[in-house]
Image (tube, grey):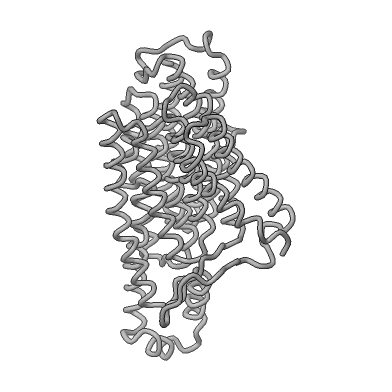
Amino acid sequence: MKYEILPWLVLFLPLVAAGFITLFTLRYRTVSALLSIGAIVTGFVLSIIFINANGWHPAVSELATTWLSVGGLHIDWGLKLDALSLMMLLVVTGVGGAIHIYSVGYMHEDDGFSRFFAKLSLFTFSMLGIVLSNNFIELFICWELVGVSSYLLIGFWFERPSAGDAAKKAFITNRLGDFGFLLGILAIWTLLGSLNFSALHDRIIDHKNSTNTLTFFLTHFPLGDLSFDMTMTIIGLLLFCGAVGKSAQFPLHVWLPDAMEGPTPVSALIHAATMVAAGVYMLCRIFFLLNPAALHVVAYIGGFTALLAALIAVQQDDIKRIIAYSTLSQLGYMVMAVGLSGPTAAMFHLTTHAFFKALLFLSAGSVIIALHHEQNIWKMGDLRKKMPATFWTFLVGALALSGVWPFSGFFSKDSILAQALAQHNYILFADGALVAGLTTFYIFRLFFVV
């Protein structure tokens, strides 16, 4: 495989930038911004070079070095390189890089300018760690680092009581989901004896291909085949708890709208392209562990979240909270797609959503800055003449979010609705179609008022 060093550089450059800014350049605003932006933009360029040289399916799909070995427990610090992780690598570094550059102008007058970029770089490293992890332990460490980073970014303006409360709410709510996630990881290790994704996949395949299922399970799982299926359902739902927290699914959806207390670039980064997408990405990564019973629950939780968030968005007055509830709704769409056995459709919508939702948040940030941090849409109006560039960029984002042809949202939403039809699940198809209509209503209500 060519350029094996590049994925390691993509992963660790943001961490180096975060450390260097924190230790040496907090007083030097321009240097701090250049280090942070340079790390993520370089990561984007190196990702393109690596994919161009090795394709979407590199000859060597894993790079690993032994990190911990105790008895039968062997844990690598490794990178999983396949189409799923490489696609997500481009999304995180590409959209994240654009948001980093935007942040220079947005945070220009803020006293915590350098501190902000240090936290952005730490967050980027954490998210890239989730994307590239080849085992559950590494994934969980980076998963928690994302939680810490989001706490620091949401509460960036910590002198505001509302920002501190929102940061604590996000952190504590995510811990509830992560407790279930950790139990699921422990159960997987107990049942299958490995935490490496490739090894786990092979063991599940061995089970499915075993010629003598009864003998296989009496050897490996003393309680028998029926017990194994029930156990895998429970494990699948425990692992899903992690996604419920991170991707803000019902009933742990309550933290995401309050997280709008952070600066607008944070809203764009965390709530469009990265943190909330981590749960959906994780479900796609461990899709082989989810049996039909678990997927059924996943699908209906996603469908309900999509509808609930869309209905709430219809009556919001805050420009960022409307877009935040829209994110919640679209995440429900993605989770529903995974539950309908459509991880490809889910990742397609995740990718398109990352771009148009970041565009909507950044356009909203442009409006908020122009109006001296006013966020109530009813105190706005007729901004088209004053802000023509923002008018057009917001319109493009709104059309994509609404699923209007030929914008990207049309194709990704269509693939999810097609997946529902292919599974003959007409309830979730109707739910998805209704949510699509509500989405168009609330985003253009915002657009026409502002």
Residue located 51% across and 37% down the image: 25
Give the quadrant of the C terminus. top left
The reply, left or right, for residue 218 in relation to residue 357 is left
Horizontally, residue 360 falls left or right of residue 165, namely right
- Determine whether 448 is above or below 353 in the image: above
From the top left corner, tell me how far across and down residue 106 is, in percent.
49, 25
Residue 242 vs residue 165, the one in the foreground: 165
Looking at the rendered structure, the number of numbered marks drawn on it comes to 0
Which corner quadrant holds the N terminus?
Answer: bottom right
Left or right placement of residue 328 versus residue 135 in this view: left
Q: Up-down: is 212 above or below 46?
A: below
At horizontal 51% and vertical 74% (from top left) the residue drawn is 199
In the rendering, at what x and y percent does residue 105 appear?
Answer: 53, 24
Is residue 418 visible to the viewer in this orientation of the structure?
A: no
Q: Position of residue 185 (x, y in %)?
A: 37, 67
* Residue 282, percent from left and from top: 45, 57
Q: Quadrant of residue 137?
A: bottom left
Locate residue 329: give its quadrant.
top left
